[in-house]
Image (cartoon, helix red, strand yellow):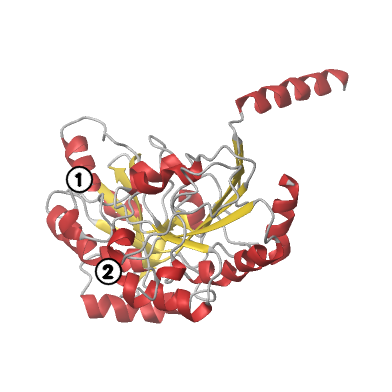
Amino acid sequence: MKQFFGIALIGLVGLSMLMTTTKKVPDTDNLDGYKIGEVVEDFTLKNTEGDMVSLKGYIDQSSVKGVIVIFTCNTCPYAVAYEDRIIDLHNNFLGKGYPVLAINPNDPAAKPGDSYDKMKERAAEKSFPFAYTIDETQEVVKRFGATKTPHVFLVDSEMSVRYIGAIDNNATDPSGVSTRYVEDAIKAIDTGSNPDPATTKAVGCSIKIRKGA
Amino acid sequence: MKYLFLIPLLCMLSCKATQKKPYYLQINSYEDIVTGNFDAIKNIFQQKDDTLYVINFWATWCKPCIEELPFFEELYSAYFGKPIKILLVSLDFPNQIESKLFPFIEKHQLKSAVIHLNDPDADSWINQVEPTWEGSIPATLIYRKTERKFYEKSFETYEELETIIHSFL
């Protein structure tokens, strides 16, 4: 018992030494999520056509070299600002082996505009060429650790996470974009190298995880 | 010019803590606001005086932000005259400053200082505010000198926010 306390104490001291000046106060509802290089567990979600779509189902297709998983939604202005660019990504990269798989992780109870019916409406309005799926149980978003919409996770053919972050470096003005992070990451993977940067940050709407979910 | 009153801010930066005069610089034209990139405001995250800085990132389109905004306003009133500065950093889209942000500030008669941050290079400035910040809003940085706390979440009640303030005082 004494030994245990000793170890625990060393652990505590070590931990406090590691702490930086800013205390990040964690939102306990959000788990840590996938990091670069980690292998993603398969998931199956319903798309706006009513079909069940699985990540593995995408990966298993011989033409697919990776999947651009994007957590997005109807209601976040940043997500809306990126809609056309997400459509372009899919259209430009499907033929190169990288389809988009969009996931709406929001709780419709908190955001009625993100209900399944509203998703169907939006997908029809914009003629989304990619699967727009709903993460009703929020199991997938919690596993990924996505915190906001839009939030991209580029997964390769080994289901390994290769890039996490923003689509490009200008959310509000498509004409002002100078770096296309996702496109650059795909090109890196295709040439056998690691995306650089492998992670980026962007402003987005927080994904509200249901209490006790 | 009618918006003059609502854009206080920006320069608590160059002013000394001991000064009793207004600590902020007024931005006095629409032009000045829209050009407020991160470099222009970064000093507000590195103040060394005895003031407690409560810096909230929000936008008029962000529902949870709007819901917690009254708590910051209440804080402003409750601690008026005390060494606490409350800054509301708006991340509204640049083309919605006049159509959304200004009308919102006017309608709600916001008392706290509002500044608009227009800097598309979020990957760079988010880390300068706080390395652990993923970029979702609402988000709040509360600091005094080197003691900093960061919240990437919304506050459910005023008491929740005030408890944190108390922990600094």
Against A68, is A112 above or below? Answer: below
Label drawn at residue A32: none
Residue sitting at 36 percent across and 47 percent down? B40
Classed neighbour count for the residue bearing mark 2: other residues with Cα under 10 Å, few (<14), some (14–19), many (≥20): few
Read off the chain for label 1.
Answer: A
| Residue situated in front as seen by the camera: A28 or B32 | B32
Badges 1 and 2: C-beta atoms under 8 Å apart? no
Residue sitting at 60 percent across and 37 percent down? B145
Residue sitting at 22 percent across and 75 percent down? A126
The image position of residue A213, as x and y in percent, is 61, 62
Q: Amino acid at mark 1?
A: Thr
Against B45, is B26 above or below? Answer: below
The image position of residue A109, as x and y in percent, is 54, 76
On the image, numbered disc 1 is attached to which residue? A179
Whether residue B18 sits left or right of residue B121 in the image: it is right
- Between the residue at mark 1 and the residue at mark 2, the CA separation in whole angstroms equals 22 Å
Q: SS for tag 1?
A: loop
On the image, numbered disc 2 is attached to which residue? B95
